[in-house]
Amino acid sequence: MNEETFRFSKSNRTLIAVLIIIPMVLLFIGVYGGLMQTLFRAGIIQSDPFVGGDYYKGLTFHGVLNAIVFTTFFAVAFANALIPYSLKKALNSKVAWTAGILMLVGSVMAAIMTLIGEATVLYTFYPPLKAHPLFYIGLTLLVVGSWVASANWVPMYLAWRKENPGKKTPMAVVGLFTTFIVWFIATLAVAVEILFMLLPWSLGLIDEINVMLARTLFWFFGHPLVYFWLLPAYVMYYVFLPKISGGKLYSDMAGRLVFMMFIVFSVPVGTHHQYMDPAISSQWKLLHGIFTFAVALPSLITAFTLAASLEYSGKKNGGKGLFGWMWKLPYFDKEKWFFAYMITGLLIFIFGGIGGIINASYQMNTIVHNTAWVPGHFHLTVAGPVMLAFLGGSLYLISQFMNKEVRLKAWALFSPYVYTIGLLIMSYGLKIGGLMGMPRRTNTGASYANPDSILFQADWMIYINLTVVGGVIMFVGIVMYITSFFTTVFSKSKEGEAEITFPISEPLHDEPATWLRNFKPYIVIAIILIVLSYTPVIYDVLQATYGGSLPYSPDSPVPLR
Amino acid sequence: MDKSEKLALTLSGALLVVFFGAIMYAAMAKNIDVPTCITDMDPFTTDTLFQTGPDSYELQMVARMWAFQPSTVRLPVGSTVDLYVTSQDIIHGFKIEQHNVNLMAIPGAINYMRVTFNKPGEFLFACHEFCGAAHHTMAGRFIIEEGGS
């Protein structure tokens, strides 16, 4: 293989390594929290050395560190690596470091506030539960840092377009710009929520807050957030996976169409998280439901395109017949350990996608809303394909940018399989428990799963116990990964200066697709849809709510002021 | 775009249209809907249950840290209840076991759903939104009794 290589400055290489290693430590704290939660929920432990008896503190740092901090860092580090590589342009080191430091300072602030128990508000931080102002400031710095990082890529792209008239933008760049366009639009709403509502209210500058409005702004952000998680994984699936499996991307145009559809439909869907909320008319909830179905389409196209690409690879590797190609993919090739992280993610995403369509299905949401089904679902998405792709990506980036050979390859290779088995068991337990009425975000071990409690639910126990079995297996998978990751980090570097390379796939079918070459029209359509879908929702919320809410601590039913 | 790709795209679209048709059918023909925006109800701070017809009741429920008021509701089989819910402090929520009722209780807003209890039994509703230290103890029951009343 003679891949194209690109040299990054030493400062940029160090930055990318830092942006991967520090969040990996935070991720592991969060993963430990996840394991403890399964034990708490089953009543196996009543306290752990890290959070004491406070299940909800553990749940907050599990969510914040794994779903918000780790993912944001990875997306930025990944784009910092792949955009300069694809455009063959140097990254502005000063801007990139400024962004990285803002994100690090913010994350550490939010993490400390959570760990000392000043922000037990879970990762959705719904008011009127109040966190310490530094928690909100920390999250703001994390977001602002990611904005600064993405602003850094824009002039690179514009310069590239000027120098390469008529040339197609590399798929990786299209995907990563899509990721950050969605992120930018989405974070505007949460910025308004934090800067104009939560932060001044937490500081005592304003007394009361409109809870429904804050919640609605949160979900304006909260659903596109899941595409911000998913899209970097899609970039790996479209750009790396076909090449690694030994073939080509089935259709270049499909990939570009998928990314543009995400720009259009990612945002005007947030109210599907609020189907069971008051103060929003059902017809607007239905409208958001329709758009949610629209945003399922690019994932269905992706399922086809990736399967077709893998079929092409399998047949090229010697697979015969209708299904023979399936057995000719590098599932257990140690040198292609990265493949394992993507194929397991895709398998999991079949279930994640089906669950997502169920959740989005308007009145069917009545059965699942806020039950254990929901964490069962999103562990099959953000803790499935997203997490696995990001872990694989992190190991790849660290080996490239620190110029190391990946160590303990067999551990790295089998980690995603072990993790997947655990995840499927755990999510099954959560989902079936949820259908029976088991609530999410609840320390069931202290009530519903405690035989001495009057609330004891004997028929939930088997499903709660399944989550323990699954959770322990998932933890083993992550320990295998972390061992390989840090052994690699602390191993001796290879000789010579690092030359960065990525496995970039070529297209099998390549069409001009001129109508998919410009982001602008799709951004404009997205803005129009957002205005149309959110104006009536905000109007309803403002006219149907009354009074404001004083801040509360999770420990007392009496307001703090 | 090649032929198989077009076919996949069409089938995907068709699948979503079928799903969406099912939703519309349930909403229109079966009248199964999600909560909507309520503006014709005065805010309430205490719980009340009263009969509005032979088999129909209105229940105004208040959620607070860490109890539902009322927490036990006894009704005869066949009762239809207009259920209004609000919160006195922070966000709560519940789903009634084996029934199509799932409501967020949010301060500053009133949520509503109509439910009919067609079979006898005890139906748990557990608070399903994190509401502080004793969230996991916040629950209640509908006790639906056979005939007699």
Image (cartoon, coloured by chain):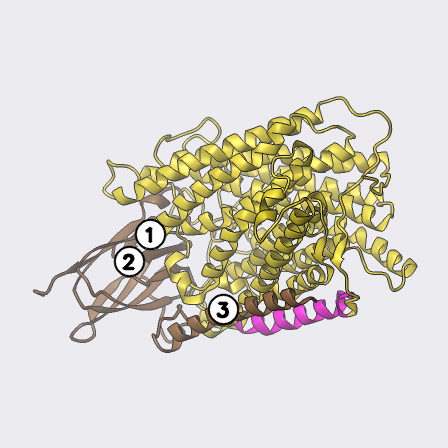
Q: Which residue is mark 2?
A: B98
Q: Residues within 10 Å of mark 1 (few under 14, many from 20)?
A: many
Tell me: B77 left or right of A118. left
> Where residue A69 appears, x then y in whole percent?
62, 42
**Does dot 2 land on a helix, a strand or a loop?**
loop
Q: CA distance from mark 3 to mark 1?
A: 28 Å
Q: Find the residue positioned furthest to the top.
A: A492
Is A281 one of the magenta-colored residues? no
Chain assignment, label 1: A
The chain assigned the colour yellow in the figure is: A
In the image, residue A517 lies in the stretch drawn in magenta: yes
Residue ID for mark 3: A541
Residue A394 in which image quadrant: top right
Q: Which chain letter matches label 2?
A: B
**Residues at discs 2 and 1 in contact (Cβ within 8 Å):** yes
Residue A490 falls in image quadrant: top right
Please state the horizontal and vertical placement of residue B7, each as a whole percent of the image: 60, 68
Crowding at mark 2 (Cα within 10 Å: few <14, some 14-19, many 20+): some
Residue A494 in sight in this render: yes
Query: As drawn, is A438 to the left or to the right of A279?
Result: left
Determine the CA span between mark 2 and mark 1.
8 Å
Q: Nearer the viewer, mark 3 or mark 1?
A: 1
Question: Percent x, y for residue B14?
Answer: 53, 71
Q: Which residue is mark 1?
A: A437
Specify which label sits upstream in the sequence, 3 or 1. Answer: 1
